[in-house]
Amino acid sequence: MATQNNLMMIASADGSPQTEHAITSQVARYNQPKIKHSDFRDDFVFGAATSAYQIEGGRNAGSKGMSNWDVYTLKEPGGISDGSNGCVAINNMFRVYFNNF
């Protein structure tokens, strides 16, 4: 869980830089009792997932080409229930990655 707290301090949900005060506030907000492995059954499997399509965005930016999902959502606008597509997504590639290097 300590790793989770550190990740929450690095970037906000919209990828904007954070002040030290904002980081301190987040640490306090997420400083919950620690969960121990022994709190779960022996056969419990921990897991997490995300996808580049949800995070990166920028299908026409730089050298990033179109993914299968880009093609699908542009040809089938109703393919996602709200009609959205991942052309921009949360744009993590530009707002967090490139702004830090």
Image (cartoon, rainbow, N blue to C red):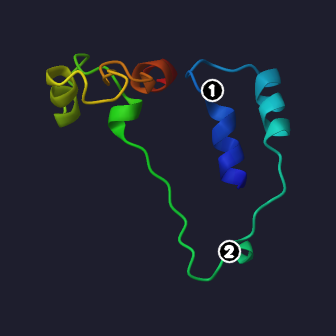
- Image quadrant where residue 79 sits: top left
Q: Nearer the viewer, residue 1 or 49?
A: 49
Q: What residue sits 34% from the left and 24% below the top?
A: 57
Report crowding for label 2: few under 14, some 14 to 19, many 20 or more residues within 10 A (C-alpha).
Answer: few
| Residue 65 in sight here | no
* 21 horizontally vs 39: left or right: right
* 83 horizontally vs 95: left or right: left
Report crowding for label 1: few under 14, some 14 to 19, many 20 or more residues within 10 A (C-alpha).
Answer: some
Whole-angstrom CA distance, mark 1 to mark 2, is 30 Å
- Image quadrant where residue 18 sits: top right
Residue 59 position, x and y percent, is: 25, 21
Is residue 11 placed above or below 50 in the rendered structure? above
Indicate which disc, 1 or 2, sits on the residue closer to the N terminus: 1
Is residue 48 placed above or below 43 in the rendered structure? above
Look at mark 1 in the image and give the residue it sits on: 12
* 58 horizontally vs 46: left or right: left
SS type, badge 1: loop
Q: Are marks 1 and 2 in contact (CB under 8 Å)?
A: no
SS type, badge 2: loop
Look at mark 2 in the image and give the residue it sits on: 40
Identify the amino acid type marked 1. Answer: Ser
Q: What residue sits 19% from the left and 21% below the top?
A: 74
Residue 24 position, x and y percent, is: 82, 31
Residue 34 position, x and y percent, is: 80, 60
Which quarter of the rendered picture does the N terminus lie within?
bottom right
Identify the amino acid type marked 2. Answer: Phe
Is residue 88 placed above or below 79 in the rendered structure? above
Q: What residue sits 85% from the left and 37% below the top?
A: 28
